[in-house]
Amino acid sequence: MKSNNELSGPICNGCRVRRIVIFVLLVIFVFGGSFSELLAQKVRATIELQLDALPDEKREKLQNFQQILENYFNNYQWTNDEFQGDLPITIQILMQDISVSYEDRYKLQIIISNNSDVQYTDKRCRMAYQKGEVPIHSDNTWNSLTSLLDYFTYIIIGEEMDKFGHLLGTPYFEKAKQIAEQARFGLGQFIEGWDLRYEMIDYMLGEKYKKYRVMKDFYFYGLYFANEDPEKARKYIKEAIRMLAEIKTEEDPKYPRVEKFINAHYFEIVQLFKDSDDSDVYDILVRLDPDREDVYRELLKS
């Protein structure tokens, strides 16, 4: 096995920029889209509201809420200049009424994802929202709605940034942790769930999760070489798959990651290795994902 030093990715700014540009071109080739769109440096959020559980009065009050939330996400630059590309996020929100006489309040179930290999579900959300209120970004003011949205958005951005370089997502994870720390004090009826959110982001910034983050750096560094240097690509991606196998043996059952990653990326792994003589990758994939053994066998034959 190659050592991490022998297989380390670039750390200089010039290499990082080249890496991002090639990754963008790969995304265009595989998924379609225009170059100008991918250089927009924007979070692109799609909000799916489910209001069926609300009384008619509350549904009327929330008539424009979906557009208000999409504006909150899409009219704000969440990232620094090193992130080149649109980051699509889908947020599904199921709302239930828990209002009191003096304030409209809601219980939320949220599913937020990057439409690929990252998804979070939270059923313990509480917020206050009054008709016509326009949420405003503020790093220094805690709000029951915007702080919740910001927390998960920064986590997804952090997950995405880790694909572009060694632990590049750390500043965004730290932003999420700061929000969770603010939320643990003085929130009264809105405190539910924030102890678990703090625990999760603390775990993601810790040593156990670091191995998964480094694995992503290896994987995506290899992936952007897929067309210009397939042998180099296979070397890095094989190391990433070996790391996944190690992670699987010590994975915290509260925070499963390996299965989600394999589900999102198994096809591109097979496409890269199907013309090689490397059977080790197939053996590791089958151990990680035994339910797809027949799928791997057929894809590797094609």
Image: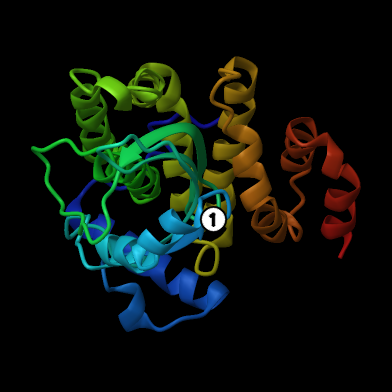
**Alpha-carbon neighbours of circle 1 within 10 Å: few (<14), some, or many (≥20)?**
some
Residue drawn 20% across and 59% down?
Answer: 134
Q: Which residue is mark 1?
A: 50
Residue 166 seen in the current view: no
At label 1, the amino acid type is Gln
Q: Quadrant of the C terminus?
A: bottom right
Quadrant of the rendered structure where residue 227 is?
Answer: bottom right
Asked if 30 appears above or below 14 in the picture, the reply is below
Quadrant of the rendered structure where residue 41 is?
Answer: bottom left
Asked if 21 appears above or below 209 in the picture, the reply is below
| Picture coordinates of residue 247, whole percent (x, y) | 57, 24
Q: Please, what secondary structure does the residue beneath circle 1 have?
A: strand
| Picture coordinates of residue 38, whole percent (x, y) | 35, 74
Direction from residue 234 to residue 277 in the image, left or right = right
The foreground one among 104 and 9 is 104
Residue drawn 41% across and 63% down?
Answer: 60
Residue drawn 83% across and 59% down?
Answer: 299
Residue 232 seen in the current view: yes
| Picture coordinates of residue 95, whole percent (x, y) | 48, 47
| Picture coordinates of residue 23, whole percent (x, y) | 41, 64
Residue drawn 50% across and 60% down?
Answer: 48
The foreground one among 217 and 276 is 217
